[in-house]
């Protein structure tokens, strides 16, 4: 059975995690993600690599584009980046295109539009003004495409969930309109089948999204740092909030303490003593939202300020 192919277009190194999460989401709902870093693009020996990407894009049904703060690799064909050319190619080929722009770039683009004729505009959030030039032209010329700002990966995923559900609804409505020329008996039978398909789809969709939501938690930078400190190289775990982490840490032998000498900025202080070694894990307040969920911190240097690990000899060694 043929399944929809979804091409993911963006700069690679700065948006690698975004590409991976979106790719996993697409795979979990039964679609096929197409990413060049996963060898999903068929490369040839006689043409530039970027042309092979454009060719592969033309065979896809949906294109998801992410515009960040970096220009990326310049095209050999023009002054645009390869990502910009991919977006233009998708629009030219009348693909279903969803474009997401980093929120700071999206907001600053309004200032750029108002000041670009002055010739002295300097961007605080992009490494190349061509990003703002391209985005401004895109906003002005393209009226029937989704162009939205984003701050977190979750926002992209939630939008795609709704958009893909809308595509299904539109397909169902189109199929329903075809039945108008049938007899009443055939129409009733078709409606029953459509209702059954919708119920089956909802059941599978909820199952897919439940699995996906679990994978989102496991990709959280705070949980990744905790996993690394605990020495979990192959196993994976996720905790929805700080209370769930309390339960997990207790199960693996840590106790939750609140010593007097610990600063009020420490949200949790986990301690485990084994083999005359004292292991401590501190979760600082800046890592936790008011509702107890973990913040999605980037980059890794930010995470390390809020997840502190220490191992020291136990002061109560027996002699």
Image: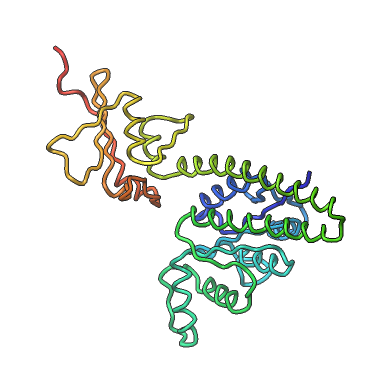
Judge left or right: residue 291 versus residue 112. left
Judge left or right: residue 180 versus residue 85. right
17 versus 84 height, above or below: above
State which quadrant residue 98 falls in: bottom right
Task: Name the quarter where the C terminus is drawn.
Answer: top left
Q: Residue lying furthest front in this view?
A: 184
Residue drawn at (69%, 56%) of the image: 49
Numbered label tally? 0
Task: Name the quarter where the N terminus is drawn.
Answer: top right
Residue drawn at (87%, 57%) of the image: 182
Query: Foreground: 195 or 205?
Result: 195
**What color scheme is it?**
rainbow
314 versus 167 height, above or below: above
Judge left or right: residue 17 versus residue 1. left
- Percent of width and height locating residue 317: 17, 17
Residue drawn at (23%, 28%) of the image: 312
Query: Foreground: 22 or 68?
Result: 22
Judge left or right: residue 140 versus residue 5. left
Query: Foreground: 246 or 195?
Result: 195
Q: Residue lying furthest top in this view?
A: 319
Residue drawn at (67%, 42%) of the image: 200
- Percent of width and height locating residue 297: 38, 51
101 versus 217 height, above or below: below
């Amino acid at each position: 059975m043929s399944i929809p192919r979804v091409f993911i277009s963006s700069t690679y190194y700065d948006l690698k995690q975004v590409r991976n999460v979106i790719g996993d989401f697409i795979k979990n709902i039964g679609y096929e993600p197409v990413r060049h870093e996963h060898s999903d693009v068929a490369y040839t020996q006689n043409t530039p690599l970027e042309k092979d990407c454009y060719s592969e894009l033309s065979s896809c049904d949906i294109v998801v584009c992410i515009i960040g703060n970096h220009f990326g690799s310049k095209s050999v064909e023009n002054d645009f980046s390869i990502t910009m050319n991919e977006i233009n190619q998708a629009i030219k080929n009348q693909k279903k295109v969803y474009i997401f722009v980093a929120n700071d770039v999206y907001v600053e683009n309004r200032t750029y539009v108002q000041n670009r004729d002055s010739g002295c505009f300097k961007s605080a959030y992009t490494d190349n003004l061509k990003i703002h030039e391209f985005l401004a032209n895109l906003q002005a010329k393209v009226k029937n495409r989704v162009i939205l700002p984003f701050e977190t990966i979750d926002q992209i995923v939630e939008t795609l969930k709704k958009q893909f559900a809308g595509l299904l609804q539109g397909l169902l409505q189109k199929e329903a309109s075809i039945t108008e020329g049938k007899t009443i008996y055939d129409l009733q039978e078709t409606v029953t089948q459509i209702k059954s398909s919708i119920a089956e789809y909802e059941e599978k969709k909820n199952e897919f999204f439940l699995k996906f939501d679990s994978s989102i938690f496991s990709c959280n930078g705070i949980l990744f740092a905790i996993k690394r400190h605990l020495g979990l190289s192959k196993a994976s775990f996720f905790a929805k909030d700080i209370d769930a982490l309390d339960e997990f840490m207790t199960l693996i032998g840590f106790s939750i303490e609140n010593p007097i000498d610990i600063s009020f900025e420490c949200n949790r202080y986990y301690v485990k003593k084994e083999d005359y070694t004292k292991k401590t894990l501190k979760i600082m307040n800046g890592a936790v939202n008011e509702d107890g969920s973990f913040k999605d911190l980037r980059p890794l240097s930010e995470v390390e300020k809020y997840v502190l690990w220490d191992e020291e000899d136990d002061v109560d060694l027996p002699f």
